[in-house]
Image (spheres, rainbow, N blue to C red):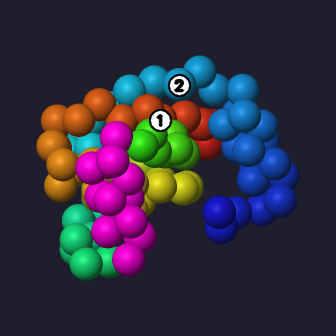
Amino acid sequence: MLAGPDLVSRLIGELHAATPEHKKAKDILRAARLTLLPTDNPHVASDLSKIKKAQPLSPILLVHGDLTTGLALQIADGYHRVCASYYTDEDTDIPVLIAATR
């Protein structure tokens, strides 16, 4: 994460304490304002292989955005996992852990 050490420490603490939630791949990408990585991206391809083998993927780590300031949702870890899940089914419920910047 690119932020000051105090904010990063607080966000990491929030992520460790967060209760897993489920969000759809298409909603995560839209809220983060990110484009879909290609299937030939090595990390996406690896995650697609895991999905085909029914291996679980790690939860996505997210940091809330802010609609009032136009700050997009941040994917702190797992952008490639979101993309692989989207390719499998854009409506897939993905486990996420969410921290807030407030």
Relative to 95, 5 lies left or right: right
Residue 15 screen position, x and y as percent: 66, 37
Between residue 10 and residue 25, name the one nearer to us.
25
Image quarter hosting the C terminus: top right
Indicate whether 68 appears above or below 3: above
Q: Around disc 1, counting alpha carbons within 10 Å, would you say few (fewer than 14), some (14 to 19), or many (20 or more)?
A: many
Between residue 2 and residue 94, name the one nearer to us.
94
Asked if disc 1 and disc 2 are in contact, CB closer than 8 Å, the reply is yes
Q: Does the magenta stretch include residue 46?
A: yes
- Magenta highlight range: 42-54
Give the residue displayed 59% in from the left and 21% down from the top.
19
Q: Around disc 2, counting alpha carbons within 10 Å, would you say few (fewer than 14), some (14 to 19), or many (20 or more)?
A: some
Relative to 42, 25 lies left or right: left
Judge whether residue 93 can be spotted in this image: yes
Residue 53 screen position, x and y as percent: 33, 47
* Residue 12 placement: quadrant: top right
Which amino acid, by three-letter code, is at mark 1?
Val
Mark on residue 20? 2
Judge whether residue 64 can be spotted in this image: no
Give the residue displayed 15% in from the left and 43% down from the top.
89
Residue 8 screen position, x and y as percent: 75, 53
- Looking at the image, is mark 1 or mark 2 earlier in the sequence? 2
Give the residue displayed 25% in from the left and 78% down from the top.
40
Mark on residue 1? none
Residue 32 screen position, x and y as percent: 35, 54
Give the dominant element type of the magenta stretch: helix, strand or loop.
helix
Image quarter hosting the N terminus: bottom right
Disc 1: which residue: 96
Q: How far apart are the two marked residues, 1 and 2, measured between alpha carbons?
A: 6 Å
